[in-house]
Image (cartoon, rainbow, N blue to C red):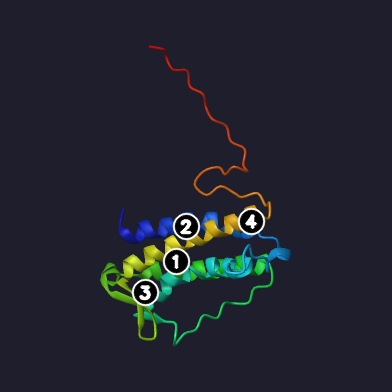
């Protein structure tokens, strides 16, 4: 399978799980955080929702400089707005990935804060890292929701909150 097609397939697979996680956040828990150093649920969820648009950013720029582009998260007021924002970012990322050329994946992309350079990597690696960031932050969200006693949907199979059965196979005794 071609790399771009593989990334598009992975994007859609991760989007299915991300939708499930974002959709179960109670509106009345948006400002909850498990620790003062942790993000609030809504800040974390908004970041998860915007991450597919990093694919677009990486493919259309040479860098992200936080000193020139301070982080200003979109204001989200309810789960419906959150899911709509996720779908908007997902569509944007997908559209740019569909138009991408493999040669772009070898171009360097820089993450910095002024003179402090955090990373310089090929664009293809940064796109993969953005996918990993979605999974990473989605797992954080799962912990937050678990602490609120909200049942967690499965990601790559059933979760501890979902019913599942194990097939028992008779094996011959030797």
Q: Nearer the viewer, mark 1 or mark 3?
A: 3
Question: In the rendered image of this protein, does residue 11 appear above or below residue 55?
Answer: above
x, y (%) of residue 79?
67, 65
Q: Nearer the viewer, mark 4 or mark 3?
A: 4
Q: Tell me if 84 is positioned left or right of 97 in this view.
A: right
Verify CB contact (< 8 Å) between mark 2 and mark 4: no
Q: Which residue is mark 3?
A: 59
Whichever of callouts 1 and 3 sits on the residue coming sooner in the sequence is 3
Q: Tell me if 37 is positioned left or right of 28 in this view.
A: left
SS for callout 4:
helix
Whichever of callouts 2 and 4 sits on the residue coming sooner in the sequence is 2
Q: Which mark is residue 79?
A: none
Q: Nearer the viewer, mark 2 or mark 4?
A: 4
SS for callout 3:
helix
Q: Quadrant of residue 148?
A: bottom right
Q: Which mark is residue 12?
A: 2
**Gap in Å between the C-alphas at discs 2 and 1?**
9 Å
Q: Quadrant of residue 67?
A: bottom left
**Gap in Å between the C-alphas at discs 4 and 3?**
33 Å
User: Label 3: few (<14), some or many (≥20) within 10 Å?
Assistant: many
Question: In the rendered image of this protein, does residue 160 appear above or below residue 20?
Answer: above
**Gap in Å between the C-alphas at discs 1 and 4?**
28 Å
State the residue in front, 84 or 165.
Answer: 165
SS for callout 1:
helix
Whichever of callouts 2 and 1 sits on the residue coming sooner in the sequence is 2
Q: Which residue is mark 4?
A: 145
Verify CB contact (< 8 Å) between mark 2 and mark 1: yes
């Amino acid at each position: 399978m071609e790399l771009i097609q593989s990334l598009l397939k992975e994007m859609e697979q991760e989007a299915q799980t991300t939708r499930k996680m974002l959709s179960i956040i109670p509106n009345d828990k948006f400002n909850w955080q498990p620790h003062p150093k942790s993000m609030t649920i809504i800040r974390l969820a908004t970041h998860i929702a915007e991450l597919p648009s990093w694919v677009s950013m990486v493919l259309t720029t040479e860098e992200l400089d936080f000193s020139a582009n301070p982080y200003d998260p979109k204001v989200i007021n309810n789960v419906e707005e959150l899911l709509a924002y996720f779908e908007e970012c997902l569509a944007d990322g997908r559209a740019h990935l569909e138009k991408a050329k493999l040669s772009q994946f070898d171009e360097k992309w820089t993450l910095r804060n002024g003179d402090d350079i955090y990373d310089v990597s090929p664009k293809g690696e940064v796109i993969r890292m953005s996918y990993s960031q979605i999974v990473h932050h989605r797992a954080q969200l799962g912990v937050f929701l678990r602490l609120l006693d909200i049942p967690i949907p499965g990601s790559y199979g059933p979760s501890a909150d979902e019913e599942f059965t194990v097939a028992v196979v008779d094996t011959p005794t030797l």
